[in-house]
Amino acid sequence: MLNKLSIIMSRNLYNTRIPLINKLWKPADMLESEELAKEIQYCVMKMVKKREDKVVNGEADSFGNDFLGLLVNAYHDSDKNNKLSMEDLVDECKTFYFAGQDTVNALLAWIVFLLAIHGDWQEKARREVIEIFGNQIPNSEEMSKLKIMTMIIYETLRLYGPSNGMMRRTESDVQLGKLILPANLDLLVIHAAPHHDPQLWGDDVHLFKPERFAEGIAKATNYNAGVFCPFGLGPRNCVGMNFATTETKIVLSMILQRYNISLSPTYVHSPIPYITVQPQHGIQVILESLYNDA
Ligand code: HEM
């Protein structure tokens, strides 16, 4: 449902709407998105009700201390100033589900694709994973030792960063390089602009070269932080950044421990910027077990 909603959103992103006319006549996309929003709201409310029922029936003594539990607690807060409305609760769930799931899915898909066509980097990453974790489940203490994998993740974020761009609004007149931007201007900063600029990264900008990040982001960007911003910039940058990279490292390590990845001949390359940058036709790969008995 959220995926459908994001596709509708992305194809209507630049459409101008006239509020009064939209009250009298709604285009098909708007009707479908309203229907989807209702279904999503219903799903979240069902999950909330389940938590509430458990407490009422005595099966649990609290709503839980995970993210949903914290939101349900805030929804039941007796202090009016802290109380969360049902609408806010649903919105928070939508944000975290969308921001947390679609992005990491896309990142993993693009890494698998790039490793499938760059067997040398796949082998380097696998060697590193086996050296650090052997065939054990990856643990958080040793995660920081995954240098090659970190380089691969950064280079994938540069080439196919899941987030298409970041929204900003000017509060007052500002000068941006040679441009003077008036107040109250909505800006969509597309990540591909700095990430794919040959002046910043060199003539090989479109090639997959994780070695760019061998000495960290600062060195790769020539100490120009704004040049590489897959998780956004400033005080409202991505709150899930560390979680996302850790999650990606765990999943990737577990795949590399078990399988050799190669690209299927049926794969058609077509990245498409919905809300996240997605492989339009999916990514078809062939996974071969590294163990004969598996
Ligand atoms: C590869 C994975 C991810 C990428 C590329 C990504 C990227 C981004 C970007 C570009 C922004 C906007 C930042 C800005 O405007 O400066 C953002 C915001 C956000 N992200 Fe992520 N994200 C990822 C994973 C996650 C995960 C796993 C979570 C949650 C578990 C998450 C939660 C959020 C939230 C809540 C915001 C809004 C922050 C705010 O407005 O203060 N993201 N993310």
Image (tube, rainbow, N blue to C red):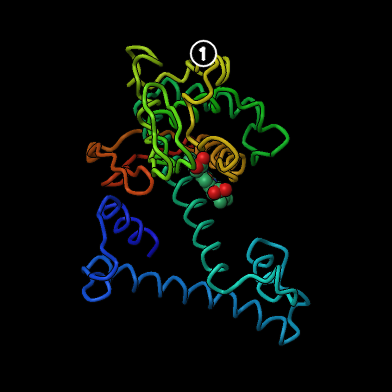
Which of the 4 image quarters holds residue 52? bottom right
Q: Confirm whether residue 293 shows in the render.
A: no
Identify which residue is drawn at 22% across, 39% down: 268
Residue 165 shown left or right of residue 64 in the figure: left
Identify whether 53 is placed above or below 15: below
The residue that mark 1 highlights is 222
User: Where's residue 158, x and y in %?
Assistant: 42, 28
Identify which residue is drawn at 74% across, 77% down: 78
Q: Could you tell me the amino acid type at mark 1?
A: Asn
User: Where's residue 180, x and y in %?
Assistant: 38, 29
Q: Neighbour class for label 1 at 10 Å: few (<14), some, many (≥20)?
A: few
Q: Which sits in the foreground, 39 or 121?
A: 39
Q: Does mark 1 have its CB less than 8 Å from ligand 1?
A: no
Number of marks: 1
Q: Which sits in the foreground, 92 or 97?
A: 92
Identify whether 152 is placed above or below 106: above
The residue sitting at the right extreme is 61
**Is label 1 in a helix, a strand or a loop?**
loop
Identify which residue is drawn at 59% across, 23% down: 147
Identify which residue is drawn at 68% across, 71% down: 83
Residue 139 shown left or right of residue 115 in the figure: right
User: Where's residue 250, x and y in %?
Assistant: 58, 40
User: Where's residue 159, x and y in %?
Assistant: 38, 29
Q: Which sits in the foreground, 97 or 248?
A: 97
Which of the 4 image quarters holds residue 191? top left
Which of the 4 image quarters holds residue 178? top left
Q: Confirm whether residue 189 shows in the render.
A: yes
Q: Check the picture and name the quadrant holding the N terminus.
A: bottom left
Identify whether 77 is placed above or below 158: below
